[in-house]
Amino acid sequence: MRHFSVFSGLAAFVLLVYAASTNTQPPALYDARPEHLWNRLFNQFYLRTSFDGRQYGGDILDPPLWSETKYLLSGPSNQQAVTRLNQFLSSSGEKLVNDPVKRAMLQRDLWAVFDWLKNIDANEYPGRGLLRERLAEILVRLALSPEQIRSLPDNYAIAAASRAFPAQYDPAHRDFAFLPPDLLDASGSWVCLGNKAGSPLAVSHVESFGGRSAFFVFLRLPGGRRATQAYVTQLRDFPNPTVPNHDQSHESVRHAGGGFPFIPNPNLPQFPAGTEVALVRQMLLIDTDGRLSPTPLTESVQIRVFREVPTREVWKAGSFRQFQDVFEFRLSRALLFAGKGGLRAVGSEETEYPQGLFNEGFDELEQKEEGSHGNQQTPVLLQCGVCHDAPGIHAVLSYSRGPWPLTPDNKLPGLTESTPAEQRQAAIHRKQDQEDWGLIYKFPPDAH
């Protein structure tokens, strides 16, 4: 099995070569020529230089931009970004690349920046508006037809079929990331979860990434599909899922800030050791008809294996890694454009400045004293433990946290068996209700 770890290391290197380095040569991802307009536009938003001259970013999943980032909002960085966008528009830059996969990725990459700008104070940073206008027009120009979107590659299936990674968890090699070939198979051993309300089950993840991605939560008990379905039914039918809060040390209370009158019942039916939970993130795109469209492109896969399901007393005395193993795969543009599936395993020692669920805060790249606000690079595979450190089903927050605050009339979500297609549509409906979605089509084209 030695080749699995070797391949994972090579795939990780594709990204890590640009994650944080002193290399001054920017990555050439969209074209072999570094000076290509698409490369220069991408690097403008995804490659940052910190206060001490180090570069950070490149082939990373999301742009290195936080709620208090000043980069791009004024001064030279703003002027350069506007110049790049104007150059793209005036030269019909969308015609420079015809590959649907690359066009899909650039739209996706720029859409993230467009959404980040929505929370910036326009009075404090007047340059924000011009950036959004230019980005909005480029997003529309890069749109693929519904047929082109449907024909995009299923990169998860390609990666799983390549046999580059083990197909199942190996407790003897806890550092080997595995990729289940039947994870997205409707008749496989994994069950996609939903709720009775029909809203996205992983709603916190959907909202944290601006509704630009659909998220699927999968559960697999050691007994396979039937055992998993039976357990979901048992949870749904459990008569007392919540209880009055008499324990301020309960993990649900601590994670949500405390002070709630009801908490999940500590005696909820528990799944057995060996249970696996997966969170899959898939890309949404804007098509040529102006509609949100699901895609088969997988952006990330997180898998947690519950090695033990301890009592609450044992759990309190233990540690996250003692009870759960975590694995993650992320999309690499370099691998995707090379036709190699595009998913690479996150290394056990890999670190990053937290984003997504953790991107509310200081921009450490702009701080003059490293670590001055505590938002330093952290191990990627330990970030799950920030929220999902609890015994068994209590660590599956899509279920156990439910809507807050919990009351007798505001219970835990009634779990149901769902499908990726249903979860995609739930994410699309949620995004379409957001004001920033409509704004993409409210900016009139003009001369640049």
Image: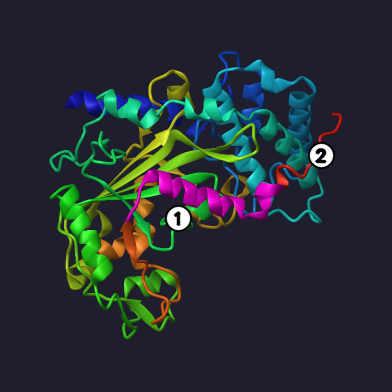
| Residue corresponding to mark 1 | 200
According to the image, what is the colour scheme of the structure? rainbow
Kind of element beneath mark 1:
loop
Q: Are marks 1 and 2 in contact (CB under 8 Å)?
A: no
| Residue displayed at 38% across by 25% down | 341
Q: Position of residue 33 (x, y in %)?
A: 60, 13
Q: Position of residue 142 (x, y in %)?
A: 65, 28
| Residue displayed at 50% across by 57% down | 374
| Residue displayed at 69% across by 48% down | 438
| Residue corresponding to mark 2 | 444
Q: Quadrant of the C terminus?
A: top right
Q: Give neighbour class at mark 1: few <14, some 14-19, many 20+ (Cα, 10 Å).
A: many
Task: Identify whether 45 is placed above or below 383.
Answer: above
Three-letter residue code for mark 1: Pro
Task: Identify whether 442 is placed above or below 240.
Answer: above
Task: Identify whether 259 is placed above or below 274.
Answer: below
Query: Could you say which quadrant of the image residue 22 lies in?
Result: top right
Three-letter residue code for mark 2: Pro
Kind of element beneath mark 2:
loop
Q: Is residue 436 magenta?
A: yes
Q: Quadrant of the N terminus?
A: top left
The residue segment tinted magenta is 417-438
**Taking the image as drawn, is residue 72 in sight?**
yes
Q: Spatial distance from mark 1 to mark 2, Cα to Cα?
A: 32 Å
Q: Viewer-proximal residue, 388 or 206?
A: 206
Q: Is residue 407 magenta?
A: no
